[in-house]
Image: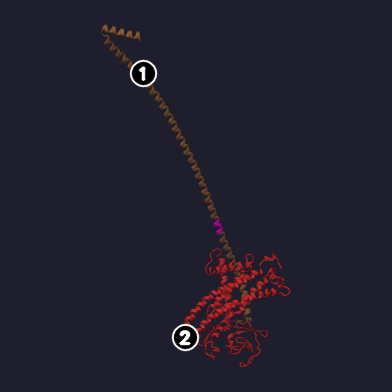
Amino acid sequence: MELITPELGLIFWMTISFGILIFILGKFAWPVILKAIRKRERNIEEALQAAEKAREEMSHLLATNEKLLNEAKLERDALLADARKLANNIIEEARQKANKEYEQILASARVAIKNEENAAFIHLKNQIAVLTIELTEKLLREKLSDEEKQNGYLQKLIDEIIFS
Amino acid sequence: MVRKFFIFLVSFCFAFKLVEAGPSSDKSTEFRPGEMIMEHITDAHEWHILSIGKTHVSIPLPVILWHDGKLNVFCFSKFHHGQTDYKGFRYMTEGPYKDKIIYVGSAKPTLEIKNPDIPLDFSITKNVASLFLSVIALIIIFLTVAKSYKQSEKQAPKGLQSLLEPIIIFVRDDIAKTSIGEKHYERFTPYLLTVFFFIFFNNLLGIVPFFPGGANVTGNITVTMMLALFTFLITTLSGNRHYWQDIFNTPNIPWWLKIPIPMLPVIELLGVFTKPFVLMIRLFANMTAGHIIVLGFMSLIFVFGNIHPAFGYGISLISILMSIFISLLEILVSFLQAFVFTLLSALYFGMAIEEPEHLTQKQH
């Protein structure tokens, strides 16, 4: 049989068998297979999309969490700063108060000391005066033990007073 | 299942038959590679399986002849390899009508035949039988796969299904979708898938050197012609207005190429027929060439063996290695040719249904 001449018998059988093949596969095999593949592909696609969505939501959630956390942190910082300020204020106030009191105490102490000092000084003065008087009395008594001397001295004193 | 069909096919031919060597082997014992190769790649009325010495084991196939308004069905073995006539029909073993069955009536075998009465031959030849086998195998394979898709809809594919799914998706996405376009590809995908798997399966079957294979179906010009004809018919029938306008009144072309001598329309119209013609020739030539090369390497063993047996053994090593290499190449070619045929078919369909985008451009 020739290599390059088409044969009637084969044309006939090829048309029939290939036609049957196209018909049967086209009716019973390919629609089912292609539909199933497409369905699965769609399923996979949907699943992927859902996963993507979930991931997005997750990241959104994470972002929200972070935001909340940041806010909380800021709030805490603010609170801490406030508290610190308050504490500082209190300390400062206390210090000032203490200082004031100290000054006051110091001032009153000073006054008291001054008073004491004055009193002591006056007392001392008095004492000295008393002592001087006593001493003078003793000395005079000694000196003016005799009459002559007494008169002399008296005369001298009178002179002094008169001539002065 | 394949075996069942085969038994059915030859049941009225008394199954296997050991046939005495025909007269051709009596002529000379000389090995003729050209003859051997041609015998292997062309069609035959019997399916030769193997020869042991002078004993040939082959399956005689049914002969179906339409002559004088009557259908004659009988087994090819009735001819005894052309030694006897049957019902007035004679199988020619040589001469200009070699391998043909002609009607000779009661003429003597010695009589030279001029202007023979050739009946219409619808015989189940080797290629037809192989064609039936492959069609039935393909139907079984894909119905099974379709069933498993139906049963395990949401599960991952397994077995045969997982083997074929990537190829199906490849044909659908890389051939149909890219060539035809997103809009219309679904209409042509079933045909493209059928053609692809038909060619691929038969190509592979052709490489198998023993019984169910080796028939060179896709290397037969009739088969490739019919395949190309199917593509041609689908292209022509689905061609839209734009497609025909591109052929008969190609836009953006100087007018003097169309009037008064319709040079371009003739060329374009010729192109409509050359496209499927090229499809036919390409598949036929590629597959036949592959078979010829493998058989050629095998023939070398016997050519050298005829000179001296030692030569034959020596050369067999190289021949076998080269045959293996070519066979591996043929596996690649099997896929490639199926791919090319399907891709080009898809491209032609794409051209036929292409939407007129450049119609709005300036026309001469």
| A79 vs A58: above or below | above
How would you rate the neighbour count of disc 2 (Cα within 10 Å): few for under 14, some for 14-19, many for 20 or more?
Answer: some
Q: Nearer the viewer, residue A66 or A117?
A: A117
Q: Residue at x 54, y 91 (%)?
A: B27
> In the rendered view, how is the structure colored?
by chain
Q: Nearer the viewer, residue B97 or A137?
A: A137
Q: Secondary structure at mark 2?
A: helix
Numbered disc 1: what chain? A
Q: Residue furthest left?
A: A146
Tell me the distance, in whole angstroms, between the alpha carbons under discs 2 and 1.
Answer: 157 Å
Q: Look at the image and tell me in which quarter the C terminus of chain B lies.
A: bottom right
Q: Secondary structure at mark 1?
A: helix
Residue A52 in view of the camera:
yes
In this structure image, what is the colour of chain A? brown
| B187 vs A117: above or below | below
Q: Which residues are magenta?
A: A48-52
Q: Nearer the viewer, residue A74 or A130?
A: A130
Q: In which quarter of the view is residue B84 placed?
A: bottom right
Q: Nearer the viewer, mark 2 or mark 1?
A: 1
In this structure image, what is the colour of chain B? red
The verdict on residue A51 being magenta is yes
Q: Amino acid at mark 2?
A: Phe
| Main secondary structure of the magenta stretch | helix
> In the drawing, what numbered circle is on residue B311?
2
Q: Residue at x 48, y 38 (%)?
A: A85
| B303 vs A159: above or below | below
